[in-house]
Amino acid sequence: MSRREEESLKRYKQWAAVILSLLLAAAVSACGNQGTAELAYPSKQVEYIVPYSAGGGVDLVARAAADYLSKEWGQPIVVVNKAGGGGAVGAEYALKQAKNDGYTALAVNVSNTTMLAAGMKAPPITSEDQVYAARIGKGTLAFAVKADAPWKDFAEFSAWVRANPEQLTWTSVGPAGFSAFGVAEWLDVIGADFAKTRMIVTKGASDSVPKVAGGHAILAVHTVGEIMPMLKAGKVKILAVSGDTRSPFLPDVPTAEEQGIQGLSVFWWTGVSFAKGTPASIIRKWEEAIAKMEKDPAFLQKLSEIHVEPAYAVSEAFTKETQAETTYYLELATKKGIRK
Amino acid sequence: MLIIETFQLLLAGFASALTPEHLLMAALGALIGTFVGVLPGLGPTSAIAILLPVTAVLEPTQGMIMLAGIYYGAMYGGSTTAILLNIPGELSSVPTCLDGYPLAKKGRGGPALGISALASFGAGVLGVIGLVFFAPILADQALKFGPPEYFALMILALTLMVSLSGGSLVKSFLMGAFGYTLALVGLGPSSGMPRFDYGVPALVGGFDMISIIIGLFAITEVLKGIDEKRTATLLGKPGSVYPKKEDLRVSAGPMLRGGIIGFFLGLLPGCSAAITSFLAYDMEKKLSKHPEKFGQGAIEGVAAPEAANNATSSAGFIPLFSLGIPSSPPLAILLAGLMIYGLTPGPVLFEQNASFVWTVIASMFVGNAMLLVLNLPMVWVWVKLTRVPYGIMAPIILMFCTIGAYSVRNSMFDVWVAFLFGGLGYVFSKYKWPVVPLVLCFILGPLLEESFIQTMAMGAGDFSIVLFRPLSLTILLAAGALLIISLVLNRRTQQRLKEERDRGVDVA
């Protein structure tokens, strides 16, 4: 070996040593410090599971919350999208497969809780599998059709559906999701045959609204925020919103009630829940942090940008409301044959 | 959408890609990618497979930028080993070996590396320009795609992949079926009901894409390496990496031609870089005044396939982003990466996530520039790496694989799945069973199922609407036509591979 080669070999050995030690450090830190969760939560990153695709309402609220909480706690709160099965796949993962140590949170919402329990005889997850930590926001339901659809208002559209239920195709998020209950309730109120209409199951709003905009389905029922991008692009129009007041984001769109269709109560909400058996101290910590978050002007600004209304509820009230909702939806689902 | 509008989007993309954070991601990706790419036997596919879980903790834009960087970096790393060691990282680097290695033997490895980097960069730029022109055309059609069209698209993607994986059709088909069977395990996409879980809780969540990919591509590669007792021997001094004026003059034409061939064929869903790099090489040889110099160390023989290789890879992003069709194994894994972020590629992606798409496109350009700036001066570091004994490298790679598989869901189940598929992959490669159809059917199968069910709902139980809608019918016909074309091209590529094998090039 010449001197130069020895030099280079030495340098290469140093290189290798540096790289190896980096790898070892990475490996060691990956092992983490289990068992100290009680001391200072969170002591490592928290996975925040969103059981829908990116860009939907649940996802956007979760991302805004994760941003705030990461700064608040000084630990990364990482949003992970696990879409499928109408929100059941991700929820099942967060509540059944992940540890109940508080490091896997679920972005829970109306579709994968009360509606899921009502829509399935053997739901993969139920309210009993989880601890509701806090509700974050709510959204008004909007009925959207293609921009150049022939109906000028919701009353006219409802009359057409009553006469031609077999011609109505509507997109839904999962067989017993949010849209399914909104449509079922509305058809029940106007006296149209739900069973004759056709549901097209999609992965979420980002998959469902374009189908209506492109004329592949007639109706999409989503939150105002989820329909907004396509509404702004002029590809869809909103015939009505549910609830007893107009949406703050769409002051010009009349409610269904104003058009003589009473009793549309289905609304969308989202919050945080954890697997059963998660330490109560961790639930408190989330409750408190979210209460603080709901007063943060930057967070509220973000909510308004994604067209979600703040609707904070503490763990106890949140749990009670979901119980009442489950009872109502169970009745609706049984009547309409949504329950499978 | 107009070209002007697209340009604005691209500029906005550049503004976003050039933020320090995103630049760092591109640089990191390029560096890590090159690092993995120069390890003997690890190509872009394995590199992306190993590093996918690492990027999954980033937000989508950053993650995709890093993955694109890894992709280009790994390709460049593969070219480096092809030229200096005669070890192609992937099939698409085989033509680079043909003249690159003789050049290295002559002590002109440096200029060969320089030309290869320049050709890659030039083709990358060409690719980005092409994207600006073609993407809006495709994106404009976005909303016309309904469930029947998606169904037809999936059929197109699957037939192509099955036919393109080389070797026997029956084997590809069986592997595809196996992949789809694996995807059936877990909760159904439309019903939300658990399927094929046999009461095992771990199976309710289904198999995870990443652990299967890590197993089939990375762990299998390690096992093969141990089996072959891989070692690398370096030749003498390769000299300066900066090519001479003469080299540049000779290479300019081949670079341009190779880039154009690579790009336009790369637009065809299912046309892989392996096909175009061979075509470009053969074309230059036909056009050359001294065809006898090819194979003896002609710099044109490095420039053409390298340009074609990179242009095809850039062009491949168009069918990937706009139709969700990956045209090569690494893109199939990038597709998995997109899915992890919940971004289903398809016509709607351009419509709804325009800023994301254009930021990634701009970073492809930035990443290519990075490679030029970072890798040329650092080429010696990479070369040293190739001399690390495999006995040290293999455990390190395995460790990465284990961490990667575990970190997906923090469950040992995924680690066992990865190792199981590592073993399976080793057996598959020994008996020449192609794994790409397996991975692709695993990823696309559920999408096919979903669009099938949606189409049935649209047609009120009548599936024939697929045949009565002009767009879906066209896609199905295109699937048939492309299948025939690709079979012909593929046969040709196989033929050439065989020729080179007979001449003693070490092809995986």
Image (cartoon, rainbow, N blue to C red):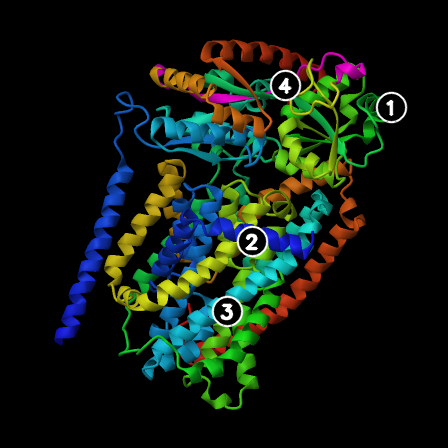
Q: Amino acid at mark 2?
A: Leu
Residue A338, can we see it? Answer: no
Instruction: Kindly state the secondary structure of the residue where label 3 is placed.
Output: helix
Could you confirm whether marks 3 and 2 are on the same chain? yes
Between the residue at mark 3 and the residue at mark 2, the CA separation in whole angstroms equals: 19 Å
Q: Nearer the viewer, mark 1 or mark 2?
A: 2
How packed is label 1: few (under 14 Cα within 10 Å), some, or many (20 or more)? few
The magenta stretch is A256-280
Q: In this figure, which residue is indicated by the disc labeled 4?
A: A267
Q: Does B37 appear above or below A325?
A: below
Q: In this figure, which residue is indicated by the disc labeled 2?
A: B11
| Disc on the earlier residue, 4 or 1 | 1
Q: Amino acid at mark 1?
A: Ala
| Disc on the earlier residue, 3 or 2 | 2
Front residue of A64/B455: it is A64
Between the residue at mark 1 and the residue at mark 2, the CA separation in whole angstroms equals: 51 Å
| Residue at 70% over, 43% down | B147
Q: Does A5 appear above or below A174?
A: below
Q: In this figure, which residue is indicated by the disc labeled 1?
A: A163
Could you confirm whether marks 2 and 4 are on the same chain? no
Q: In this figure, which residue is indicated by the disc labeled 3?
A: B122
